[in-house]
Image (tube, helix red, strand yellow):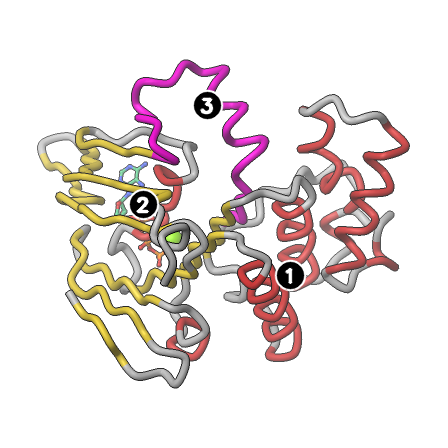
Amino acid sequence: MSVVDDEILIQVEDLRKIYEMGDTEVRALDGVSFDIPRGAFIAVMGPSGSGKTTLLDILGCLSHPTSGEYWLAGRRVGGLRDGQLAELRNHEIGFVFQNFNLLPRDTALGNVELPLLYDAVPRRERVARAKAALEAVGLGDRAHHRPNELSGGQRQRVAIARALVNDPSILFADEPTGNLDTASGESILRLITELHARGNTIVLVTHEREVAEHAERIMSFRDGKLVNDEWRKKDGKVWRSQ
Ligand SMILES: Nc1ncnc2c1ncn2[C@@H]1O[C@H](COP(=O)(O)OP(=O)(O)OP(=O)(O)O)[C@@H](O)[C@H]1O
Ligand SMILES: [Mg+2]
């Protein structure tokens, strides 16, 4: 590994997210610390309720931890103003939500154009880039369908096109293949693997071991804690485990 490969992109320290529910508290994240080097491909695994989405939302700057620190590219996220956070999200981060989060009244094209609209990209370029992103996920012929006129897998692909349209340096994807048939799942994974090969950092949540095996590192969570953290060689053998 070169020095550049070793650059730390994400660093979290003693991250906690606690929800107060009446008399009880839910420790969705319970003291998590780790680093992610720039350009890494990480899979996040763990049973339902173990804190995967909670973690991804914090890493994607969509929510704040109850306590603990998060540094993204050397910047302390907790210390950024809303405008700085929005800019970071718009330029650096692509996010695929577990439940897609598509706007129901907008077409596939309209949904994919959205991040570019926030970024004041001129209409002609916006449409061209959104079309290219839809084509990249194999949906060039569904640009004018609304979400309820698409299958679950197709909606998932629109969500991925929207996450990629800004050419983000980091992609956070929460179960991007969870609702897909095998062929669509494989094509999404190919896309993500290509993105990684181009130097992007990927953090992918998945229930499926086979999907996780595509990553260089598998981080496993249970009850809000990081319980296993293994880096893998290309042949699938573990070479470093924490
Ligand atoms: N807004 C909330 N208020 C209260 N508790 C919450 C809230 N959001 C999540 N939780 C709880 O926090 C825990 C972690 O939830 P999270 O969504 O991160 O799990 P997950 O690992 O993504 O699960 P899944 O695999 O089912 O998507 C769960 O026990 C959940 O019930
Ligand atoms: Mg989840």
Q: Position of residue 170 (x, y in %)?
A: 50, 46
Question: Disc 3 on helix, strand or loop?
Answer: helix
Q: CA distance from mark 3 to mark 2?
A: 17 Å
Question: As displayed, is residue 114 above or below residue 9?
Answer: above
Circle 2 residues within 10 Å: few <14, some 14–19, many ≥20: many
Which dot marks residue 152?
A: 1
Task: Say whether mark 2 is within 8 Å of ligand 1.
Answer: yes
Q: Position of residue 156 (x, y in %)?
A: 62, 57
Q: Is 203 or 169 nearer to us in this picture?
A: 169
Q: Is residue 90 magenta?
A: yes
Q: CA distance from mark 1 to mark 2?
A: 24 Å
Circle 3 residues within 10 Å: few <14, some 14–19, many ≥20: some
Query: What residue sits 24% from the left and 76% below the top?
Result: 239
Image quarter hosting the N terminus: bottom left
Q: Which residue is mark 2?
A: 55
Q: Amino acid at mark 3?
A: Leu
